[in-house]
Structures are given as C-alpha cells and as structure tokens.
Amino acid sequence: MDCNPKSSSKIPSTFDYLIADLTRDVNRAQPRDALQFCANWFNTRLQEQRTRIRDIFEQGNPSPVSPHQRTRDDSRTSTTHIAHITPSSNSPARRPSNHSPFGTLEIPGNAAVNGDGAFLGPPPSALGRRVSVSAESLSPSSGPERPPPFFVKSPEQLKRLEEAIQDAFLFRKLDNKKRAAVLGAMKEMHFGPYEAVITQGDDGDYSIFPDHDAPTSSTSTAAGDWHPVYGKKVFAYTRGGTFGELALMYYAKRAATVVTTSPCTLWALDRVTFQTILLDISARTRRSYETFLASVPLLQSLNDAERAKLADVLQPREFADGEVVVHEGELGKEFYIVEEGEAEVLKKARNQQGLVVDEVVNKYKRGDYFGELALLHRTPRAATVRAISAPGQPNLKVAALDADAFTRLLGPLRDLMERSALAYTTTSSHIVSQ
Ligand SMILES: Nc1ncnc2c1ncn2[C@@H]1O[C@@H]2COP(=O)(O)O[C@H]2[C@H]1O
C-alpha cells in the first residue's frame, strides 16, 4: 500500500497524512503488539492536537471558561444582573437538553456527539472530565465529498460578518478561498433578550460569533451568584467575543450557559465545519509552513523544533498587484517571509531635477524576507515593499510574524540579518526615513 500522501493523485487529506506518519513510526518502532501501538499512537496524537489547539486559543482568544479563568474576576464583566434573566422558549426550563436553538443542519456528520463514547480511551477534557470521542475526531478532514453548508448572504450581511470575526484568532490563518468557505457556512441567528444561546451540559454543536452591532450577552454557570435557572453569572461578552468553541474542540459537554441580555444577532458555525475547516486548516497551515520554512535560507540554522514554533505563529497575508505591504517611513510591527509571488522594494530618492521619486532598489521572490530593519533597530521602515504580479501570475503571499514573536524566535538570527542588510543598496540620492 502506498502510504505517502504526496504520491497519490487526489489531494491528500489529514487522514492520509496521519496514516503516512503512523506507517513511518510503525516501521521505525517495529512494535510487537501493532494494535496496541496504533491505539496508543492515535491517542497521543489526539491529545497533542487538543493541547496545541487549546494553547492557540489561550494565546489568541482566551476563553472565559478555560480552567484558570473561571474564577477570575474579569473587568469585562457587565453589571447586568443575572437575576433578571427569565427562561425563554429556548431555555433549558422549556426544552429538552440537546435541542439546540440553531436546529440541526442537514449536513453529513452533523449528528449530536454520542454522550458516552469510550473509543480508544479519550483524553480528559480541558475541564478535567473524560470526554466522548466521535469517529470524526480521527479524521477531521472533510475531503471534497463533504462540502460545508452554504448560507447565501447579502453584501450588508457579509460586511457585518467580516466585522464580527475580525478579531477571531483562528480566522487569521485562513487564506482567501478557505475564508470564503467558512463565511459561507456561517448562519445568521437572531435572539431576543434573555434567551439561552447555549446550555450548560448540552453537547457542543455550534461555535458562536456575536455580531459587532449586537448588544452584549452574558455567561452563567451553576453556583455562587445564583439564578434559579441559569446559576451564577461568571462572564459577560462584549462585541467581538466568541464562544462555544471549547465543547467543539474537546467533544465535551457545554461548560456554561450563554444567555443574551438584550436582543442579539449572532453568527453560528456548525461543529463539523468548525473542525473540518478551521482545525484542519490550522494543522495543514502549520504542516505546510514547516515544510516551507525548512527551505528558507535565513532559517537554515534553526532546528525542527524552532521552525515548528515559528510555524505556529506565522500568519498568511495576500497582496494583489500594486498593494503595499510596508510603507517607507511608517512604524514597523511585523516581519515577512515571501511564500509565493513577487514584491519590489522602493526607496524615495531625489532625481536630477530635485523631485522626489520612488526608485526600485530590490526585488523579492519565494524564500526571501523583509521588514527586519524596523524591528531590529526600532526605526521607521527604511523602504516601501509592494506586490508585483503580472496578469495570470499569483498574488504575493507572505507569512507575517509580529514584533514580539520576531524578537523571541528570530533573535538568534540577528547577526545574520544585520550582515545581509549590509548588502542593501543606498545611494546619496536616497532620502533617509526618520
Ligand atoms: N536598499 C534597501 N534599503 C532599505 N531597506 C531595504 C532595502 N532593500 C530591501 N529592504 C527591505 O525593505 C524593508 C522595509 O522595512 P524595514 O525597514 O523594516 O526593512 C527593510 C528591508 O527588509
């Protein structure tokens, strides 16, 4: 059997990659009990994946119900009293558990998670409980036969949706095509005041992204500052806060109830799309970054673990022909590595007539980097870098690294970058950016 996902003509899925990795490890380890080895291997991979995703969430989008935050008094908590909340038609008092207000989307694999699955001894959840594992957890990749749902949206809806997700960490990893697929799969939902959007103890079926124009909603969970139906209020969401992802990531029960405090517009992303597109993409992005980074000359001296850390924090950006990535004279906040396409570097200079013109001083292609000077020296951008792509040629795609991660992860390469920068051409006609 050919287990190399790259040698097959179809697009390899996460499952293909997993089997290739497993085959490689089995060949290395030559286990006597192959079945036990495979069971342990998958279990370990599952735990690693959950841990990595949890870490990503905690870095980029801390959840109010993550274990170390649950008891913390958060300044974002609103002053709305939970005691005002009354059960709605969607509340647990009036409907059976597991009846989501979103209904069930008619897409394959969208059935509720089995509550007591014990397949392969699932890892404990982030909240310390054992969690169920559905068959989907081993193969989050949907493949072409399982397209995500698509909800038609007006330009006005799309604009609101874009605003709603602009701070959501996972979306930053999506390229334009995948982003469009996720936006299409998101469903607009309207809630009245004091309706339970998700209910503690239910299975997780949707991740929720509140509309930016929506008033706040609040979280409650049983204990303490008590409400007869919803229990204690532990957190309040303001605009831009997303919730409902924990149960989707860990196949755990809902860890808290989320109740609207006034009429709300929310965007719901179903569990299968969340996992197949978002989680799968973050794993794929990481994997393809690791391969790509190994080919970048600047990073040759980093080891695999260092490059893997870098792959975790890089964010894809795309620029059409003529779009500027960095402006000469501006403050620098990011560093860039070219993944695809081309860019040119322009510096302001005085021509013979004394007029200020942009002069091309450099060009970039795949594997090149730029934007290091402003971060290394804390100076304004020394030049403008803009995308160039002839008709039919790919747009410029870069992997961006923020200033903190640049210092932390590429600090050891400082000397190398300084030496390479000596080769930058600057003539007396160039105007020095201050
Ligand atoms: N001749 C050049 N002078 C200055 N910067 C250059 C030149 N050629 C390429 N660059 C890159 O252009 C980038 C602009 O942003 P930075 O100043 O942060 O870092 C700069 C370098 O990475």
Image (cartoon, rainbow, N blue to C red):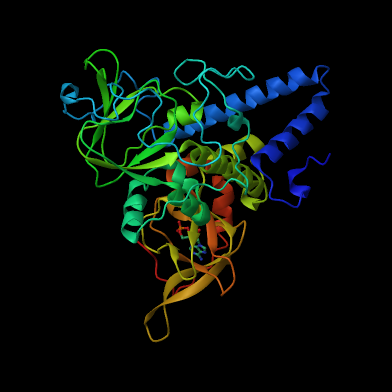
Instruction: Identify which residue, 132 or 427, lies in the foreground.
Output: 132
Against 78, residue 215 (above or below) is below
Against 163, residue 103 (above or below) is above
Given the current orientation, which residue lies at the most extreme bottom position? 353
- Does 201 sit left or right of 160 as displayed? right
Given the current orientation, which residue lies at the most extreme top position? 224
Residue depicted at x 54% and y 58%: 397
- Locate the N terminus and report the quarter of the image it occupies: top right
Position of residue 165 measured from the top left corner of the image (x, y, whole percent): 37, 46
User: How many circles with numbers are drawn on the protein?
Assistant: 0
Q: On the image, which quarter does residue 18 sit in? A: top right
Residue depicted at x 74% and y 48%: 6
Work out whether residue 430 can be spotted.
Answer: yes
Work out whether residue 372 can be spotted.
Answer: no
Position of residue 82 measured from the top left corner of the image (x, y, whole percent): 19, 23
Position of residue 306 measured from the top left corner of the image (x, y, whole percent): 60, 37
- Does 180 sit left or right of 39 as displayed? left
- Locate the C terminus and report the quarter of the image it occupies: bottom left
Instruction: Identify which residue, 92 or 384, lies in the foreground.
Output: 92
Instruction: Identify which residue, 176 or 331, lies in the foreground.
Output: 176
Residue depicted at x 37% and y 83%: 354
Position of residue 422 measured from the top left corner of the image (x, y, whole percent): 55, 59
Against 278, residue 87 (above or below) is above
